[in-house]
């Protein structure tokens, strides 16, 4: 190791700005399936609390310090906010253009970007993506005032507390930061496709475990349908059968329909297993005897923002 030096060329780093805000309302399952652009975002002040030391004494000396749980909090400021944030701010529409407040507040996640600069490249050096989970906005003041000779736009502000989400082999967390100057550029681009969406695939906020898998894993295999049960062109299928599709990668989006050969839709429900690789369709009622059914598999996307070629499988049920 060589002697330390300070302020070398290219090492004078700084962080600035806030841009590309995205709001992700939380679903009842604890996921963040759809993101919307947050225009007019002006400030996000992260304010962690806790981690306070409680001294423990023994043998007339300070024996150790016990730290309280650390919590993530923030203040969000913006000139405006997405319509989807109304529910997060305790608002509900009674009718088109008619809203009331003081309602239950929906939890949400968000993403925003800050710029990382240095003395050589300036703000082109890199950036950080900041992801927040389990956020809950507290009621906030909205100060309206008359327009005068020095008009100002209203700057809305919300105090935000969070509920951490699970992380394998780590303590739960409510925040993740991705540094473009340190991580793989190709993997980062894949993550941004997930966060911001691509043609035909909605933006969403992946949970920390998925992000870890994305950055730790080797280059993913192309998305493929590994197996389907009943198998393609299978006959004598029991009428009480469910349809199970197994993919080689975890999937996050799909548009799959089951119909008769004549095009009559089959009612039922889809469910994903914990690995998000096995998708099961369970018909609401038994299938008909001696009938050919089509499984139309379309718009399937995996956690790596890869798409599956649309395809159709068929099977025929047993005679009565």
Image: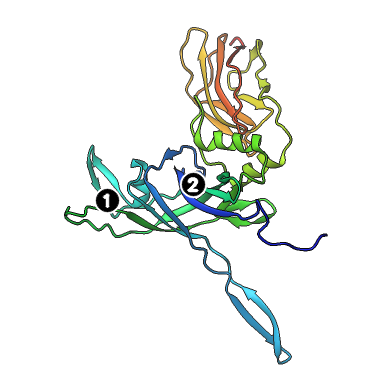
Q: Quadrant of residue 271?
A: top right
Instruction: Name the side, left or right, on which 311 lies relative to 41.
Output: right
Picture coordinates of residue 306 (x, y %)? 61, 27
Question: Which residue is more in the foreground, 26 or 286?
Answer: 26
Observer able to see residue 167: yes
* Quadrant location, the N terminus: bottom right
User: Which label is found at residue 112?
Assistant: 2
Question: Which residue is more in the foreground, 245 or 108?
Answer: 108
Residue pictured at 63% horizontal, 51% vertical: 167
Residue linked to disc 1: 153
Total numbered labels: 2
Question: Which residue is more in the foreground, 277 or 76?
Answer: 76
Q: Using the image, determine if residue 168 lies above or below residue 70.
A: above
SS category of the residue bearing label 1: loop
Question: Which residue is more in the foreground, 316 or 201?
Answer: 201
Instruction: Name the side, left or right, on which 276 lies relative to 27.
Output: right
SS category of the residue bearing label 2: strand
In this view, the residue farthest toward the bottom is 60
Of marks 1 and 2, which one's residue comes earlier in the chain? Answer: 2
Q: Using the image, determine if residue 252 lies above or below residue 172.
A: above
- Mark 1, residues whose alpha carbon is within 10 Å: few (<14), some, or many (≥20)? few
Q: Quadrant of residue 273?
A: top right
């Amino acid at each position: 190791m060589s002697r330390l030096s300070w302020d070398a060329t290219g090492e004078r780093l700084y962080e600035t700005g806030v841009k590309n805000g995205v709001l992700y309302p939380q679903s009842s399952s604890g996921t963040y399936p759809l993101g919307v652009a947050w225009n007019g975002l002006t400030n996000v002040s992260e304010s962690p609390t806790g981690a306070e030391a409680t001294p423990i004494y023994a043998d007339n000396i300070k024996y150790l310090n016990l730290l309280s749980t650390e919590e993530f909090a923030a203040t969000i400021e913006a000139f405006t906010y997405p319509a989807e944030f109304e529910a997060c701010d305790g608002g509900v529409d009674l009718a088109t253009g008619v809203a009331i407040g003081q309602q239950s507040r929906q939890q949400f996640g968000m993403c925003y970007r800050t710029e990382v600069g240095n003395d050589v490249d300036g703000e082109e050096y890199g950036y950080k993506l900041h992801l927040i989970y389990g956020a809950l906005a507290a009621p906030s003041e909205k100060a309206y005032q008359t327009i005068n000779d020095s008009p100002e736009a209203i700057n809305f502000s919300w105090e935000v507390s969070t509920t951490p989400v699970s992380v394998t082999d780590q303590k739960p967390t409510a925040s993740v930061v991705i540094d473009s100057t340190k991580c793989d550029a190709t993997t980062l681009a894949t993550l941004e496709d997930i966060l911001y969406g691509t043609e035909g695939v909605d933006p969403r906020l992946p949970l920390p475990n998925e992000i870890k898998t994305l950055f730790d894993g080797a280059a993913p295999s192309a998305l493929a349908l590994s197996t389907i049960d009943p198998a393609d062109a299978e006959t004598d299928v029991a009428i009480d059968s469910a349809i199970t599709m197994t993919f080689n990668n975890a999937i996050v989006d799909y548009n799959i329909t089951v119909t008769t050969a004549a095009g009559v839709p089959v009612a039922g429900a889809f469910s994903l297993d914990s690995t998000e690789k096995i998708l099961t369709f369970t018909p609401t009622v038994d299938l008909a005897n001696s009938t050919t059914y089509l499984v139309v598999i379309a718009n399937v996307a995996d956690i790596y923002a890869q798409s599956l070629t649309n395809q159709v499988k068929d099977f025929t049920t047993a005679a009565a």
